[in-house]
């Protein structure tokens, strides 16, 4: 009762203007306020029309071949279509041929790439003050754990792209060390936000799986990364795969092998951020590459990552799908917060997290399995995206690829709410298991488009 009386007295004091004699609002002038940014839910979504509309097929504008056919780059309007043929040379020769071809198709490659690299460095190390010792130590340590063939490939690339330029210096010239760090950004510097969803054949019109991943990353201060979209075919017998990436990047962001195993990385934070260490750590992105080269089923590839997760420097999700199966490798590297596991449609979720339809598996930048670290139910950005996916897809049946695309692009891009297609989207890749083909939105240098075109990236076989 005493607390109630104190509250009433305080309220009366505020209403009377701290004891003044004002009894009404005759002389009160309301302060100016800006226009509300709130929008009704109906304004968040818009109709998109992709049903029956095929993706755009781009013509080749120029072809460059180096290393006796070891590297072929076809220059398209929106991306570079690259084939590295590992049957035509050693790993270091392949890397060198790739670098040589890049110099021919993009003589300004250093000017485009090095500033972007340093933007990523500064985001991870905001207080370096020009001393890049810590960056060098991380890079050397992770690079030293790569399989020898990968090291040879990267050395060949770095030497050919940089010549005699060495060390870290923000000078617009790409050095060998900077070229190698560029391949290890997710392992050394970390990524940003991503999401994805996969629909089993029970939910689609074709009876075959459809998988989509959205990559969000720094576009660069001048959106320079959007001028370097690449479709990279690594051709090596039964170890072949196709990677949707950026020109000159040999690491894995989104990739699918010839048997249809698709793997996509999604950065995950930690409730209690632990200091970065390279002790007993290795590259998870190059383990994904190894899995793509050696496993023909998504669950086998995901299990390989799960077994090795304790050696990865960051917590990550990896969306893994094939024609008949799908799971998320929740790679928790902080034992006090969770454990590495494979989440599928039967895995219990965090308390309070809703997902009603086992025909779909969703993934955002948090672990969703019950018992793993929870940066989802208490993180508005992750939770809103999760719920958006649920609202757009849960319960949908007979879904075509066109309908799938309409839902993935349904949000307006001019609202202030956290959304699936933020202004950091680099690419949105859809894998259609009926046609064994990829199509993608590739964000241009003008930024994320409200009504984007999907580009035909061809078959992964």
Image (cartoon, grey):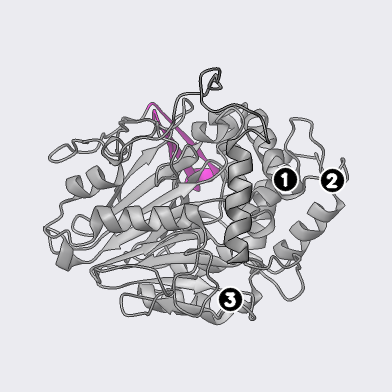
Contact between labelled residues 2 and 1, with CB atoms less than 8 Å apart: yes
At a point 71% along the width and 50% down the height, the residue shown is 124
Q: Which residue is mark 2?
A: 128
231 over 436 or under it: above or below: above
Query: Residue 42: x and y, percent?
Result: 26, 38
358 left or right, relative to 366: left
Tell me the tag on residue 121.
Answer: 1
At a point 36% along the width and 39% down the height, the residue shown is 441
Residue 388, magenta (yes or no): no
Q: Nearer the viewer, mark 3 or mark 2?
A: 2
Q: Earlier in the sequence, mark 1 or mark 2?
A: 1
Residue 248 at least partly seen: yes
Contact between labelled residues 2 and 3, with CB atoms less than 8 Å apart: no
Residue 67, magenta (yes or no): yes
Q: Nearer the viewer, residue 320 or 273?
A: 273
Query: Residue 420: x and y, percent?
Result: 39, 47
342 left or right, relative to 24: left
The quarter in which the C terminus is drawn is: bottom left
Q: Earlier in the sequence, mark 3 or mark 2?
A: 2
Residues at marks 3 and 1, CA–CA distance in whole angstroms: 24 Å
346 over 458 or under it: above or below: below
Region rendered in magenta? 61-80
Mark 2: give few (<14), some (14-19) or many (20+) Cα within 10 Å.
few
Secondary structure found at label 3: helix
Q: Which residue is mark 3?
A: 309
Mark 1: give few (<14), some (14-19) or many (20+) Cα within 10 Å.
some
Secondary structure found at label 1: helix
Q: Nearer the viewer, residue 406 or 111?
A: 406
The quarter in which the N terminus is drawn is: bottom right
Q: Earlier in the sequence, mark 3 or mark 1?
A: 1
């Amino acid at each position: 009762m005493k607390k109630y009386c104190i509250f009433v007295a305080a309220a009366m004091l505020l209403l009377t203007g701290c004891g003044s004699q004002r009894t009404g609002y005759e002389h009160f002038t309301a302060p100016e306020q800006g226009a509300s940014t709130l929008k009704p839910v109906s304004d968040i979504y818009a109709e998109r029309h992709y049903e029956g509309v095929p993706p755009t097929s781009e013509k080749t504008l120029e072809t460059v071949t180096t290393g006796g056919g070891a590297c072929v780059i076809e220059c398209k309007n929106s991306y570079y279509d690259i084939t590295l043929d590992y049957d035509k040379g050693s790993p270091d020769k392949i890397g060198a041929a790739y670098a040589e071809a890049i110099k021919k198709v993009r003589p300004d490659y250093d000017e485009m790439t090095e500033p972007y690299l340093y933007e990523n460095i500064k985001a991870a190390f905001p207080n370096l003050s020009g001393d890049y010792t810590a960056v060098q130590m991380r890079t050397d340590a992770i690079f030293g754990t790569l399989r020898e063939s990968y090291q040879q490939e990267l050395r060949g690339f770095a030497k050919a792209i940089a010549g005699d330029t060495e060390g870290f210096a923000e000078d617009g010239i790409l050095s060998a060390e900077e070229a190698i760090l560029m391949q290890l950004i997710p392992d050394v510097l970390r990524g940003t936000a991503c999401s994805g969803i996969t629909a089993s054949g029970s939910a689609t019109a074709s009876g075959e799986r459809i998988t989509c991943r959205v990559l969000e990353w720094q576009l660069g201060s001048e959106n320079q990364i959007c001028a370097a979209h690449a479709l990279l075919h690594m051709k090596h017998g039964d170890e072949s795969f196709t990677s949707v990436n950026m020109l000159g990047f040999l690491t894995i962001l989104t990739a699918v092998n010839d048997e249809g195993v698709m793997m996509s990385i999604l950065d995950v934070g930690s409730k209690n951020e632990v200091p970065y260490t390279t002790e007993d750590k290795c590259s998870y992105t190059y383990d994904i590459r190894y899995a793509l080269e050696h496993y023909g089923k998504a669950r086998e590839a995901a299990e390989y990552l799960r077994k090795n997760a304790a050696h990865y420097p960051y917590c990550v999700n990896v969306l893994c799908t094939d024609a008949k199966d799908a799971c998320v490798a929740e790679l928790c590297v902080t034992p006090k917060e969770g454990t590495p596991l494979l989440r599928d449609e039967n895995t219990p979720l965090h308390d309070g997290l809703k997902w009603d339809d086992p025909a779909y598996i969703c993934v955002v930048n948090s672990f969703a399995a019950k018992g793993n670290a929870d940066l989802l139910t208490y993180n508005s950005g992750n939770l809103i995206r999760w719920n958006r996916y649920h609202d757009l897809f849960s319960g949908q049946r007979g879904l075509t690829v066109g309908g799938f695309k309409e839902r993935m692009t349904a949000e307006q891009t001019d609202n202030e709410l956290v959304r699936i297609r933020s202004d950091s989207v680099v690419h949105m890749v859809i894998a259609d298991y009926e046609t064994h083909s990829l199509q993608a939105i590739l964000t241009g240098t003008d930024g994320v488009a409200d009504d984007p075109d999907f580009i035909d990236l061809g078959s992964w076989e």
